[in-house]
Image (cartoon, rainbow, N blue to C red):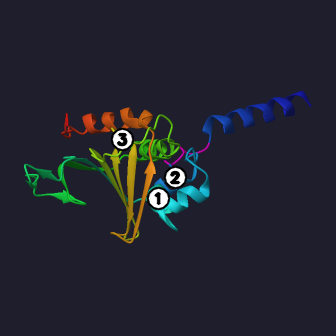
Amino acid sequence: MRWIVLALLALSASLAACGDPAPRPATRAENARSIPFAGRDEKEVISAFGEGGRDIIEHAASVELLTLNPHQLVDGKLSPETDRLRGYGVLGRVTVTDDTEHRSIVEAVYRGLKGEGAGPASCFWPRHALRFTHDGRTVELLICFECTWVHVYRDGAEHEARMLFGAGVKPVFDSAVKAHGLTLHKGN
């Protein structure tokens, strides 16, 4: 009987040593499902992003980070950049391909939507922007951390919302801008 117990222990130890095959990395869709919703309540977010907008943001096949010239006009003329987003000159853009960075950006967006540290001002000088694309649909966020507003556009100009956006998440965006070597407009 003792040798049977020893044989079973040896067998279970050898099976445990084999273990399961290496776990496969999670897909972007699986990662998105695990993003904790840390923003406003669901109705407010759907109001901001439109029906299906949250799905676009969380499951985006393409996430673009952009830096903008916050002044559409300089000395009464359009700012000098030829690449434009919603009338603002684009200083730099990069497609975020890393799933971890995508998740970090989405989490920052949700935290920003809480509006913590937001004190609205009448200006709107966006220096940061995001474009999420999923299944041919887009959500664009133009963010002004100076006045703590975000303007949300979905599928072109079909859906626009303006919401307070907490300045506490600015370091996440600035870190991504720096990591990708993008130019960030300084000053007024």
Of tags 3 and 1, which is closer to the observer?
3
Q: Label 3: state its secondary structure.
A: loop
- Tell me the residue that label 1 is attached to: 59
Q: Residues within 10 Å of mark 1 (few under 14, many from 20)?
A: many
| First to last magenta residue range | 20-25
Q: Residue at x 52, y 52 (%)?
A: 32
- The residue under label 2 is which amino acid type? Ala
Q: Is residue 24 left or right of residue 95?
A: right
- Tell me the residue that label 2 is attached to: 32
Q: Residues within 10 Å of mark 2 (few under 14, many from 20)?
A: many
- Tell me the residue that label 3 is attached to: 147
Q: Position of residue 44 (x, y in %)?
A: 56, 56
Q: Is residue 54 visible?
A: no
Query: How far, Cα to Cα, is label 2 from label 3?
Result: 29 Å
Say above or below: 176 vs 25: above
Q: Residue at x 51, y 37 (%)?
A: 116
Quarter of the C terminus within the rendering: top left
Give the mark, 2 or 3, whose residue is nearer the N terminus: 2
Give the mark, 2 or 1, whose residue is nearer the N terminus: 2
